Amino acid sequence: MKPLELYIHIPFCIQKCLYCDFRSAPSTKEERQEYVLELCRQIRTYRKTAGDYHIVSIFVGGGTPSILEGEQIRGIFGAIRDTFVVDEDAEITIEMNPGTVTEEKLKVYREAGIDRLSIGLQSAENEELKILGRIHTYEEFLDTYRLAREMGFGNVNVDLMSAIPGQTAAGWEKTLRKVAGLRPEHISAYSLIIEEGTPFYEKYGKARDDADALRDDPLPDEEEERQMYRSTKKILGEYGYQQYEISNYALPGYECRHNLGYWDRTEYLGIGLGASSLLHNRRWDFGEEPVALSIQEQMEEYMFLGLRKTEGVSRSKFAGEFGRGLDEVYGNVLRKMYELGLLEETGDLVRLTERGIDVSNMVMCEFLLG
């Protein structure tokens, strides 16, 4: 049996955040119950596929999965365990937002085998939370975090966001220190991306050159955004967190195994609206037909996913997987990136430099062979 990661998508939230382009929306109780019943039915349709795999990690994402009732979560995990072989030490994560979690729900999570919580905070400053359209305050986050600890959860991630409109480097440092002082095992620190189709795009994307439109709560400029990113590693390092991926930091031994599997191209199955899958080198979104990846596409993915990790990509693993050396396929690109100081080599590993991380999207585009 081969290792498999399982992703379950819950596309519901209380209120859509102003920056969010994920597959999620407000819903009624009836709509959520109907979705959960169909989700459980869909999970059970994979019984034949499940015979070839054992589940090493499960990630329930959204949306806001914690909007579901405890019994609905219990039903989902009942369907999973009826269908798949789940490792005893599998990492099982559920995303949640402050204000949507109760003691009763947390009890159900523990009974279901969930051992990792991912709490969407984004900022420790209430004014920044309002700007983002979040429904909670920092104080409500603290209540949720403390309740999780009281209920015995010993592996907690907190999501944070930098480059928020109106945010300063000093404000970002304040958020980092407040959260790191709580000692969650993991911190995801992402930079805001202005996505099309969101209210933020209407203001900050389409109107980027309109000084009057951006007078209130302007976005940090590019240099200030880079300063925030560079300070993140330094500040979190003071609290014992190690950066293991461009946007992720963990106390030793608490790196997110599910995410590492994604960057290493471990096979994964996504169930639910908006979920994606990778099986037998075929990719597809839920409800669509699988598309086979060419060898070229597989090599490209190996590079631009693997380079997100601070350890980089392995020459020997590349050769073992594709039967060709890294230099044979990417020699010219590697030489160019070395000369520009954007990549460096340590033994078997090729990784981004600090400068390379600043322009990581550009570097990764260089590894597209088409």
Image (cartoon, rainbow, N blue to C red):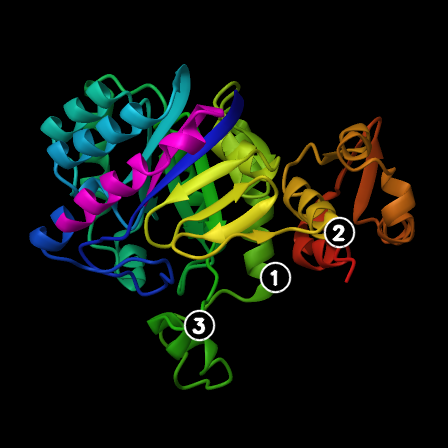
Q: Residue furthest front?
A: 48
The answer, for residue 150, to whether it is visible in the render is: yes
| C-alpha gap between disc 3 and disc 1 | 23 Å
Q: Amino acid at mark 1?
A: Glu
User: Which segment did they paint magenta?
Assistant: 34-61
Where the C terminus falls, by quadrant?
Answer: bottom right
Circle nearer the N terminus (1, 2): 1
Considering the numbered disc 3 on the image, is that residue within a helix, a strand or a loop?
loop
Q: Position of residue 242 (x, y in %)?
A: 56, 28
Q: Residues within 10 Å of mark 1 (few under 14, many from 20)?
A: few
| C-alpha gap between disc 1 and disc 2 | 35 Å
State yes or no: residue 57 in magenta.
yes
Q: Look at 91% across and 47% down and name the residue there.
A: 331
State yes or no: residue 234 in magenta.
no
Considering the numbered disc 1 on the image, is that residue within a helix, a strand or a loop?
helix
Residue position marked by numbered label 2 in the rendering: 296
Q: Residues within 10 Å of mark 3 (few under 14, many from 20)?
A: some
Q: Nearer the viewer, residue 110 or 292?
A: 292
Residue position marked by numbered label 3 in the rendering: 196
Q: Nearer the viewer, mark 3 or mark 1?
A: 3
Q: Position of residue 80 (x, y in %)?
A: 30, 29
Q: Position of residue 253 (x, y in %)?
A: 51, 18
- In the visual, does 263 lie left or right of 363? left
| C-alpha gap between disc 3 and disc 2 | 29 Å
Circle nearer the N terminus (3, 2): 3
Q: Amino acid at mark 2?
A: Gln
- In the visual, does 213 lie left or right of 351? left
Q: Nearer the viewer, mark 1 or mark 2?
A: 2
Q: Which mark is residue 223?
A: 1
